[in-house]
Image (tube, rainbow, N blue to C red):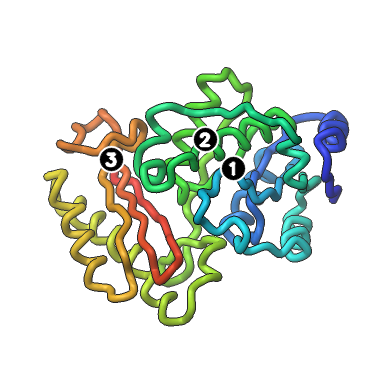
Amino acid sequence: MKVLESVAAMRVARQAMAGSMGFVPTMGYLHEGHMALARRARAENEHVVASIFVNPTQFGPHEDFERYPRNQERDLAMLQKEGVDAVFLPPVVEMYPSGSCTYVTVEGLSQKLEGASRPGHFRGVATVVAKLFNIVQPARAYFGQKDAQQVVIIKKMAADLDMNLEIVVCPTVREPDGLAMSSRNVYLNPAERRAALVLWQALCLAREMWQKGERRAEVIPKAMRELIQKEPLARLDYVSLAHSQTLEELESIPKEGEGSVLASLAVYIGKTRLIDNIVLE
């Protein structure tokens, strides 16, 4: 497995890879969710490239860029075990040389949900993903459903900018008790780890209400908020019931054939902010 730290080296390596290539962009501190993406990419392509880059432009001024968990040696061993051909591991100065001043913004979609809570976040995401796509030139790129809004934004960016690749969305990988796997779970102490289950419990409640026929758009989020507020270690950021493609908050439930519904939420457990979602369809 090649480890490549420069744009030039990555491009040379890409030219030597004949046939389709699947790409798994990550910020490192990998877990089983990332490995599921790598395995899917391996199954569907002749070559697989992953990237590890903690992207500073998607972190706000008071967010956790400096303390974001990192373990390069462990990450590389995990990717090698999954048969990844190459890992792009650039330093910040390689991705953002001095004088860089060009950004990608997907208007509208980027200002909702996570974008409302984290202004500028998706400008950073779209910019770095566009750069990675341009450098790596994959046939397919693999993302997890856990970051549902990110997936919608990247799909829109790829379509609007005529990028010649397929965005493949893979199911959220969960712990046995339902907690969505996330690199930030490492921040949780044992009591907070137990409390974090309230995110999954709230989503399961939404799904249960949906399956029983509840279609009043305001009722399901209200029940989710009430459940979360019962957990002493939880502090709610937002709960949303939105159209899964436009991300518009629902005033009425779409009719059959008019699109599925994204139930999503962001909750602070102690000082750690966690997100999760499910699609109701």
Find disc 3 in the rendering and name its residue.
242
Disc 2/disc 1 C-alpha distance (Å) = 8 Å
Find disc 2 in the rendering and name its residue.
123
Q: Residue 142 or 54: which is nearer the viewer?
A: 54
Q: Which is in the foreground here, disc 3 or disc 1?
A: 1
Vertical order, 238 against 270 (above or below): above
Q: Which is in the foreground here, disc 3 or disc 2?
A: 2
Disc 3/disc 2 C-alpha distance (Å) = 21 Å
- Quadrant for residue 267, please give it: bottom left
Q: Identity of the amino acid at label 3?
A: Ala
Instruction: Answer whether residue 139 is visible to the viewer in this image.
Output: no
Q: Secondary structure at mark 2?
A: helix
In the rendered image, residue 94, in percent from the top left (x then y), is placed at 77, 39
Q: Quadrant of the C terminus?
A: top left
On residue 57, the disc is 1
- Which residue appears at 51% of the width and 41% of the height? 169
Circle 1 residues within 10 Å: few <14, some 14–19, many ≥20: some
- Which residue appears at 39% of the width and 32% of the height? 109
Instruction: Answer whether residue 215 is visible to the viewer in this image.
Output: yes
Dots 2, 1 in contact, CB < 8 A: yes
- Quadrant for residue 161, please give it: top right
Q: Identity of the amino acid at label 2?
A: Arg
In the rendered image, residue 211, in percent from the top left (x then y), is placed at 20, 52
